[in-house]
Image (cartoon, coloured by chain):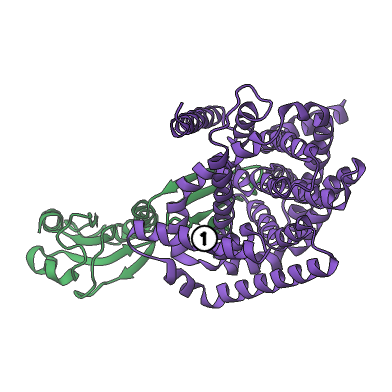
Chain colours: A green, B purple
Amino acid sequence: MNVDETDLPGLGRRKDFMTASGRRIGVVELREGTMELIVSTWDDPDTCQASIPLTGDEAAALGNLLGGQHLAMKLSEEHKEIPGIVTRQFSIAPESPFQNQPMGKACIRTRCGVSIVAIMREGEVLPSPGPDVVLHSGDLLVAVGTQEGLDSAADILRNG
Amino acid sequence: MDPLALTLIELGAVVFCLGLLARLAGRIGMSPIPLYLVGGLAFGAGGVVKLEGMQEFAHLSGEIGVILLLLMLGLEYTAAELFTGLRRSWQAGVLDLVLNFIPGAGLALLLGWGLVGAMVMGGVTYISSSGIAAKVITDLGRIGNRETPVVLSILVFEDLAMAVYLPILTATLAGVGFLGGLTTVGISLAVVTVVLMVALRHGHRVSQAVHSENSEVFLLNLLGAALLVAGVASALQVSAAVGAFMLGIAISGATAHSATRILEPLRDLFAAIFFVAFGLNTDPTTIPPVFGWALILAVITAITKMVTGIWAAKRAGIARPGRFRAGAALIARGEFSIVIAGLAVASGVVPDELAALATAYVLIMAILGPLAARYVEPALKAFGGSVRLSAKA
């Protein structure tokens, strides 16, 4: 994928690319640290139909949704034949007790038999993360296990 | 009445009126600058109400307003951005300079204001209002547009051009001879180059020197440094404004961002007073005789900015609607045109009509600019549509 980066003196930096459907999509990183999601119009790729301001958390969440959905769908497809095995996504809330803690501290596999198979972070995938990976708020954990196991894992991640 | 009480009442009334004007401007979505100017005209010599108690304060505050305007112009771009801007867009920048300097300078010569008048009016018509342009781009949601970097790099070039132009203007206005002028210009060019080099390599040290986590300390450091540098520059006849501008360029990175945030309210206050002070010193009765000229100049320089934008955007591979958007975004003139005219008026070597012409011109352009930027595309569509229809018929 060819992403164009353009300086916007005094404002920030634009990163965008052309989609297969002929529309330009990307982000503008403003100097104040905020971000805007931009989508071009149909008839004029130079202009923007929408520019949506996103906070850092929102941008990370959107990145995870786009990547995580894809990943979770693929995993569910693969586990379809095994009855009782479910894939679910957990996001780490800012108030989670495991925020900024190594994942191993939550002992999810030992306590509920659930495997964290990937972490989505800022639009990137960390495949099969080890116990020493530090969790951040906004991370999306892709977990595989039984229905009950996943429920208790969700509870552990939320309340410790 | 006690003179202090009178001054306070006058100042309070003026600032309060400015608040009302700014709110009105916000309500109808225009730049407040023309309203401030009109406010100044109404209060000043020959205006509706005459204010005398606050003249002295208005004068000094106006000077501080100019320093803050230029300091923040310098803060807006980092030295690295200035260099890349210069490399990427110097052709468009030169075209911009030639096309937009000549109409103002030409009219000044035509009206018999001499070379000094031409130098001033050329600057007034050349410099776009980066404040209005940036606001228009943000308000109309064009930050992500492809023509926006083109517009911004032209503004960056104008910024650099100001750094060279202001010292030359100051020297010309001071009436120093050719040799003296050459020395001043030489000194200021050397200073500009050195500051840019220092800012590029050691910007973080300058930033460190003024930076503080405590916003009170930071504000006092910044303001103190700006006034000191401006004062020294003024003593060296390099123009106080240029000194502040150079300091702004030298401050970079995160410090520059927080400096912008912290100085914004101060700049808004003092710049507003500066526009009023400029209006105060302009006799409203001198405007009607030059208004026709201002209108002609406005039409010509709106077209020349349009041509600049269209040419630059075309070179960057932008399609037709984007080219017109780029041109229209550049049309607005504002704060820096008044800064230039203000320097000229303060020196007393230009005729009063110049201030009147500059005022009328900025009044028109500050209103016309944002309107043009907003409606250029619908106009183009309507126009393009009718052409297609007539072709079909």
Q: Is residue B83 above or below residue B385?
A: below
Name above or below for residue B314 compared with residue B81: above
- Amino acid of disc 1: Ala
Residue under pointer 1: B226
- The reply, left or right, for residue B327 in relation to residue A14 is right
Res A142 → quadrant? bottom left
Q: Is residue B244 visible?
A: yes
User: In the rendering, at what x and y percent does residue B377 appear?
Assistant: 70, 36
Single out the residue that lies furthest toward the bottom: B201
**Left or right, residue B376 beside residue B176:** left
Q: Which percent across, then down, holds residue B157?
A: 70, 60
Which residue is pictured at 92% across the width and 42% down the height? B110
Q: Nearer the viewer, residue B182 or A143?
A: B182
Q: Quadrant of residue B113?
A: top right
Relative to B356, does residue A83 appear above or below in the rendering?
below
On the image, the x and y values in percent for residue B241 come to: 62, 57
Quadrant showing the C terminus of chain B: top right
Host chain of mark 1:
B
Residue beneath the point at 77% across and 53% down? B314
Residue A143 lies, with reference to residue B286, above or below; the image says below
Q: Residue furthest top?
A: B48
- From the viewer's side, name the closer residue of B194 and A29: B194
Q: Residue furthest left?
A: A111
- Near-viewer residue (A75 or A91): A91
Say whether residue A41 is left or right of residue A108: right
For the residue carrying disc 1, how many other residues have a C-alpha within 10 Å: few (<14), some (14-19), or many (20+)?
Answer: many
Does residue A8 show up? no
